[in-house]
Amino acid sequence: MGHELIAILDFGSQYGQLIARRVRERHVYSEIFPAETSAEGLKKLGIKGVIMSGGPSSVYDEGAPTCDRGIFKLGVPVLGICYGMQLGCKMLGAAVERTERHEYGRRRLDIFDKQDLFSNLGDWLNVWASHSDQIVQLGEGFEVLAATESCPFAAVRSVKHRFYGVQFHPEVSHTHKGEQILENFLYEICRCSGDWRMSDFVEQSVEAIASRVGDARVICGLSGGVDSAVTAALVHKAVSDRLVCIFVDNGLLRKNERESVISTFGDHFHIDLRVVDWSEQFLRQLAGVADPQEKRRIIGGEFIKAFESEAQTIEDARFLAQGTLYPDVIESGSTGDGPAANIKLHHNVGGLPVELGFELIEPLRDLFKDEVRVVGEYLGLPENIVWRHPFPGPGLAVRIVGEVTEERLEILQAADDILIDEIKAADLYRKISQALAVLLPVSTVGVMGDERSYENDSDTGGGHERFYDGGLFAYPARGAGDDIEPDYQRGTGREPCSV
């Protein structure tokens, strides 16, 4: 990529991706590598530093993950977090044991050494700890930087090995000034210059795509979601009218989805957009099917047919662009060439068969979702596209419990539209990462005419006044702040309900 690189060794931490994001938020590029990555391999990448993540294991467990000892001989600073600290200290001569005084949750950290790692942070901080093991005896040449009431070696340093360890998680929002600790590591210790910018990424990506594609044409499967939208906009900036986007209307979309995609990409960006109306075929194949996995299988198969029917009409198309993101690459177990592309291919565009013969273009594969949104804003995509909530590939079919029918789809589309409008009216849309309505095949109390009824939506005919108990599922956006409740629930406006 041409940027300074911080390598993050993953020991199974639930916060591994969060560490990478926090580093990038400080304008330093980071990548996650398997714990066993060789020191020689990292050296060839010209890394500026290493962060060893936490993990669920104990360092003395049989088969516990470890790393190449050569990491500590590369001459670059190393920061160990939680398990990463314990492993690093153990490999450098310290003793680690399970203690009776476990730490979980917020703890007061008293700072003894206010140089480098804890520069400009004061005498103490509230930090977030989660561990049962501790360092009980330090190796030769180690210094204690900070402690909690029950953890005397909560932060340490070895000048000789350029190793720093913290027995808490600076990457989580619960740690006060945790981002400053990471920034101190990046700038005070690793001496990074902070040259990672989205504008640079866009320009480099455009140049690389244009060079690779040449005079050929590129096909991009649009879904209406942010990943495919940003991919399309980025590729279009690189190859202009040699990009052809295919949008498959499966009849399972959100209300006015088709019109929104046509308006944004066909009318505003003037991209060659082909709309394939396959809704009748999808609904016909889904008739009588209630099993969610069977729905997904059918939808994936029909998508292939729909996409292929249009793709075959596009001459000189050699490339398929898709919105693979960095979490997809990490979770597939590959940070380079490997199974990630095939896994994401199935996820993104319904499992397009290899025999279609396209070469893949995945311009977003090094980015996290929040970075993709920044790219989208930079490329001029409208806010309603850039900040749109995630939507499943099989669409509303998996948000209908039971059989998918045209009537049930119309009900759910209307409910979903009302739900999102209410969230936006309350100025909560950007504070919630995902909100959804689900149609349940359960009877509810309502009114038909002047009488109380106990029906479900398929039992009632037209012309009746029906009231449905309903619910909203919503999740706060990452980093939205502590003022957002963990679960936001409310009724449809008629009767309060709990889900």
Image (cartoon, rainbow, N blue to C red):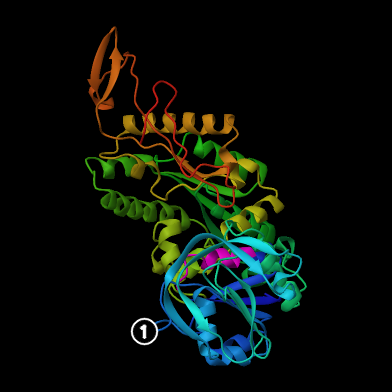
Residue 316 shows up from this direction: no
Residue 470: % across, % down:
37, 30
Residue at numbered disc 1 = 63
Q: Residue at x 59, y 42 (%)?
A: 430
Q: Which residues are magenta?
A: 12-22
Q: Looking at the picture, does residue 95 appear above or below residue 319?
A: below
Q: Residue furthest top?
A: 450
Residue 370: % across, % down:
60, 55
Question: Is 297 left or right of 478, judged from the image as shown?
Answer: left
Q: Residue at x 42, y 68 (%)?
A: 342
Tell me the amino acid under the disc marked 1: Gly
Q: In this rendered view, identify the residue nearer to me: 375 or 249.
A: 375
Q: In this rendered view, identify the residue nearer to me: 216 or 212.
A: 212
Residue 417 shows up from this direction: yes
Which part of the image, by quadrant, shows the C terminus?
Answer: top left
SS for dot 1:
loop
Q: Looking at the picture, does residue 399 appear above or below residue 218?
A: above
Question: Is 180 left or right of 40, judged from the image as shown?
Answer: right
Instruction: Tell me which corner region of the image, top left, top right, bottom left or bottom right, holds residue 146.
Output: bottom right
Q: Residue at x 36, y 41 (%)?
A: 399
Residue 9: % across, % down:
53, 78
Which part of the image, by quadrant, shows the N terminus?
Answer: bottom right
Question: Is 148 left or right of 419, judged from the image as shown?
Answer: right
> For mark 1, does the 10 Å Cα neighbourhood hold few (<14), some (14 to 19), or many (20 or more) residues?
few
Residue 368: % across, % down:
57, 61
Q: Is residue 287 magenta?
A: no
> What secondary structure predominates along the stretch shown in magenta?
helix
Instruction: Tell me which corner region of the image, top left, top right, bottom left or bottom right, holds residue 319.
Output: bottom right
Q: In this rendered view, identify the residue nearer to me: 281 or 2.
A: 2
Q: Is residue 18 magenta?
A: yes
